[in-house]
C-alpha cells in the first residue's frame, strides 16, 4: 500500500510539473507543492482517505477532482464579499472576475470573460452537472441569448444544484439554483472545462479547436448583439468613452438605463474601451439638456445628476412624507437593504428609486422604501 501511495504522488508530480513551476494546490488533508528548483513533495493523507474520496479515478481524473475540490474550498472563503464591478481581486469581484480569480489562484489558465470560457469543453445537461461546471444565464440587461452572468456548480442535489457566484444584488453567495425563479427563467446552458485546462495544456490552438466544435454556442450566445433601432421621437447623441467611465454612470448622465445603452450599441457585456463612441437616444424635447454631456468634465457630469464630486454623496433633496426612507450605509446593496424590510425586494427598491446600477449606491444616499 505504501508503494502504491508514493507511485500516485510521483505520477501526479510528473504530470503537473510539466506545466507549472509554483505551488499547485492544497487541501485540508492533501498538500502537494511544486517549485522550480529543489522540488518538494509532501503527502499528508492516509491510504483509506484517498481510496474513499477518489476511488475508481485514473490519475488525470484524480488531479482534476483534487483541483476542483481545492478551487471550491478557496472560493467559499469569499462568501459575503461585496460585489465590485470589474473586480478580479479579493477587494471585490464581479461574476466573471470571481471565476477568473479562484482558478488563477491555482495557476489554471482561466480566461477573464465568460464568452471565452463558454467555448471551452462541452455543454452539460442540468441533470448531469458536477462540481466545477460553469453555468451561464442572461443578465437583466440582455435582450437576447447573450451571456450576461456566470456561476460555478459546487454541489449536485437530486432536484437542483448549488452554485457559488458574485451577484450584483447580493455579493458573493452560495445558492440553490432552482429556488431562484430569476435564474431559472434566464438559464442558457452549462459547460464542463476539458482535461487540458486542468493539466495546464490550454493554448490558442486548442481554443480554435473548441471554438469550432462549439460553433452553435458562439453564434447563439457569444456573437455580438444586433443593435436596437432608434426609438421614435428621439434624437441621436454620441458619447465618447473616457477613463473612469462605466455604463451605469453614462446611463445616469443621460437619464436612460443600462439596458437601453447596451441594446442601442449591440453590447453583450459591460466592458468599455476608452475612445469607443456610444449611441445615446434621448427624447427630442430633451436634446438641449443632454447635448453637451459628452464635452463635460467628470465632475460636471456628476453635478448634473446631483452628486457632489468633493464628497461623492448626493445633494440633499426634500423628502416625500408619503414614503419611508433608508440612509445607505457602508457595504449596503439593494439586496441587503431589502432584507431589513418585510415584503420588499431588491427590485422594488431599484425601481422605486430609479436605480439602474446596484453597485453605484452612495453612502448617505436616501432611498425611498415604501408608502407609510
Image (spheres, grey):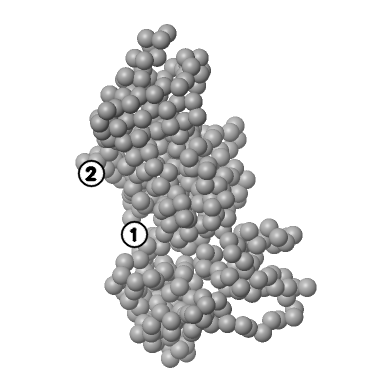
Instruction: Relative to 67, say whether 176 is above or below.
Output: below
Q: Give the distance between the C-alpha atoms of the residues marked 2 and 1, in whole angstroms.
A: 21 Å
Q: Quadrant of residue 254?
A: bottom left
Badge 2 crowding class, 10 Å Cα cut-off, few under 14, some 14 to 19, many 20 or more, is few
Residue drawn where x is 50% and y is 21% of the image: 53
Q: Position of residue 191 (x, y in %)?
A: 41, 40
Say whether residue 315 is visible.
Answer: yes
Q: Nearer the viewer, residue 242 or 26?
A: 26
Q: Position of residue 345 (x, y in %)?
A: 66, 60
Q: Where is mark 1, residue-wise?
A: 224
Instruction: Relative to 331, say whether 204 is above or below.
Output: above
Badge 1 crowding class, 10 Å Cα cut-off, few under 14, some 14 to 19, many 20 or more, is some
Residue drawn where x is 61% and y is 83% of the image: 316
**CB of mark 2 within 8 Å of CB of mark 1?**
no
| Quadrant (top left, top right, bottom left, bottom right) of the N terminus | top left
Say whether residue 233 is visible.
Answer: no
Q: Quadrant of residue 66?
A: top left
Q: Position of residue 183 (x, y in %)?
A: 55, 50
Residue drawn where x is 46% and y is 70% of the image: 248
**What's the mark number on residue 356?**
none
Secondary-structure class at tag 1: loop
Left or right? Give the position of 7 relative to 87: left
Residue drawn where x is 39% and y is 87% of the image: 291
| Quadrant (top left, top right, bottom left, bottom right) of the C terminus | bottom right
**What's the mark number on residue 204?**
2
Q: Nearer the viewer, residue 20 or 175?
A: 20
Name the mark nearer the viewer: 2 or 1: 2
Residue furthest to the left in view is 205
Secondary-structure class at tag 2: helix
Instruction: Relative to 95, say whether 298 is above or below.
Output: below
Q: Could you tell which of marks 2 and 1 lies nearer the N-terminus?
A: 2
Amino acid at each position: 500500500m505504501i508503494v502504491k501511495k508514493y507511485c500516485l504522488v510521483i505520477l501526479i508530480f510528473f504530470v503537473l510539473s510539466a506545466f507549472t513551476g509554483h505551488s499547485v494546490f492544497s487541501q485540508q488533508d492533501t498538500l502537494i507543492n511544486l517549485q522550480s528548483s529543489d522540488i518538494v513533495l509532501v503527502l499528508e493523507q492516509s491510504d483509506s482517505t484517498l481510496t474513499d474520496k477518489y476511488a475508481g479515478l485514473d490519475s488525470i481524473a484524480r488531479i482534476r477532482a483534487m483541483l476542483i475540490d481545492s478551487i471550491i474550498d478557496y472560493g467559499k472563503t469569499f462568501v459575503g464579499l461585496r460585489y465590485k464591478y470589474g473586480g478580479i481581486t479579493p477587494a471585490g469581484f464581479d461574476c466573471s472576475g470571481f471565476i477568473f480569480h479562484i482558478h488563477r489562484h491555482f495557476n489554471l489558465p482561466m480566461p477573464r470573460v465568460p464568452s471565452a470560457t463558454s467555448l471551452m469543453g462541452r455543454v452539460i445537461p442540468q441533470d448531469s452537472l458536477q462540481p466545477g461546471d460553469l453555468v451561464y444565464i442572461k443578465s437583466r440587461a440582455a435582450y437576447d441569448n447573450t451571456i450576461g452572468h456566470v456561476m460555478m456548480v459546487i454541489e449536485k442535489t437530486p432536484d437542483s444544484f448549488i452554485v457559488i457566484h458574485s451577484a450584483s444584488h447580493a455579493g458573493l453567495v452560495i445558492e440553490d439554483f432552482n429556488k431562484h425563479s430569476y435564474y431559472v427563467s434566464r438559464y442558457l446552458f452549462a459547460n464542463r472545462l476539458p482535461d487540458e485546462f486542468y493539466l495546464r495544456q490550454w493554448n490558442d490552438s486548442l481554443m480554435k479547436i473548441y471554438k469550432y466544435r462549439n460553433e452553435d454556442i458562439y453564434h447563439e450566445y457569444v456573437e455580438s448583439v444586433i443593435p436596437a433601432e432608434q426609438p421614435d421621437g428621439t434624437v441621436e447623441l454620441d458619447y465618447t468613452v473616457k477613463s473612469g467611465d462605466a455604463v451605469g454612470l453614462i446611463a445616469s448622465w443621460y437619464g436612460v438605463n443600462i439596458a437601453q445603452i447596451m441594446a442601442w450599441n449591440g453590447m453583450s457585456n459591460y466592458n468599455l474601451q476608452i475612445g469607443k463612441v456610444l449611441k445615446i437616444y434621448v427624447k427630442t424635447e430633451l436634446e438641449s439638456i443632454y447635448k453637451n454631456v459628452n464635452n463635460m468634465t467628470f465632475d460636471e457630469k456628476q453635478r448634473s445628476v446631483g452628486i457632489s464630486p468633493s464628497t461623492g454623496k448626493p445633494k440633499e433633496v426634500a423628502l416625500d412624507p408619503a414614503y419611508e426612507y433608508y440612509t445607505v450605509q457602508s457595504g449596503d446593496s439593494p439586496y441587503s437593504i431589502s432584507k431589513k424590510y418585510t415584503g420588499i425586494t431588491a427590485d422594488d427598491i431599484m425601481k422605486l428609486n430609479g436605480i439602474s446600477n446596484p453597485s453605484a449606491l452612495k453612502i448617505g444616499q436616501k432611498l425611498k422604501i415604501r408608502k407609510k
